[in-house]
Image (cartoon, helix red, strand yellow):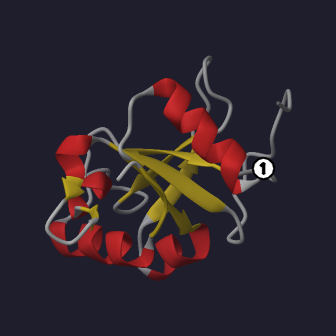
Amino acid sequence: MPDKMLPDISSEEHLFRGVPRIQWDFQHNRPSSAIFKDSKGVSVDRDYKRKNDECIKRLLELRDFVGVAKIKVQKVLEINASVFYKPTPDNIYHSEIHDSPHKINIGGSKAQKLRDASEVVYCKF
């Protein structure tokens, strides 16, 4: 694990989001758009030169997720959402997706677009 990362997140990086059972759409076998709704900011891990397997393993160590989705930063920006690097003492990769630079909570249609642009990279089922 690197001691320090560049604060600017490249548009080529991917962001990984753990999916709890309650946010899995079993009818369509994919995450619901709720994975991109959080009044405190959508918590994600940036890949920062790590392989998919490393990113997935890290999220699964934190919590019993039923799935993990990833989305490219470029896609987030194209949907007009914002990405912020916000490391925590426990997680140097922690970042957040917000609706915009001035609004945290992501609206319904934007959350659906983010979900549709994301890719499931791990599924328990």
Relative to the observer, which residue lies in front, 53 or 6? 53
Q: Reply above or below: 17 against 118.
A: above
Quadrant of the rendering where the N terminus is positioned: top right
Relative to the observer, which residue lies in front, 71 or 52? 52
The residue drawn where x is 22% and y is 50% is: 23
The residue drawn where x is 25% and y is 73% is: 112
To which quarter of the image does residue 80 belong?
Answer: bottom left
Q: Reply above or below: 7 against 102.
A: above
Q: Residue furthest top?
A: 89
State left or right for residue 35 relative to residue 120.
left
Q: Residue 19: image x %, image y %? A: 35, 47
Residue type marked 1: Arg
Q: Residue 7: image x %, image y %? A: 73, 46
Q: How many marks?
A: 1
Q: Residue 6: image x %, image y %? A: 80, 46
State left or right for residue 20 relative to residue 121.
left
Relative to the observer, which residue lies in front, 117 or 77? 117
Q: Reply above or below: 100 against 94.
A: below
Q: Residue furthest front?
A: 125
Q: Residue 71: image x %, image y %? A: 52, 67
The residue drawn where x is 34% and y is 69% is: 115
Q: Reply above or below: 80 against 107.
A: below
Q: Which class describes the residues within 10 Å of circle 1: few (<14), some (14-19), or many (20+)?
A: few
Q: Which residue is mark 1?
A: 50
Q: Regarding mark 1 in the picture, which secondary structure is present there?
A: loop
The residue drawn where x is 43% and y is 58% is: 101
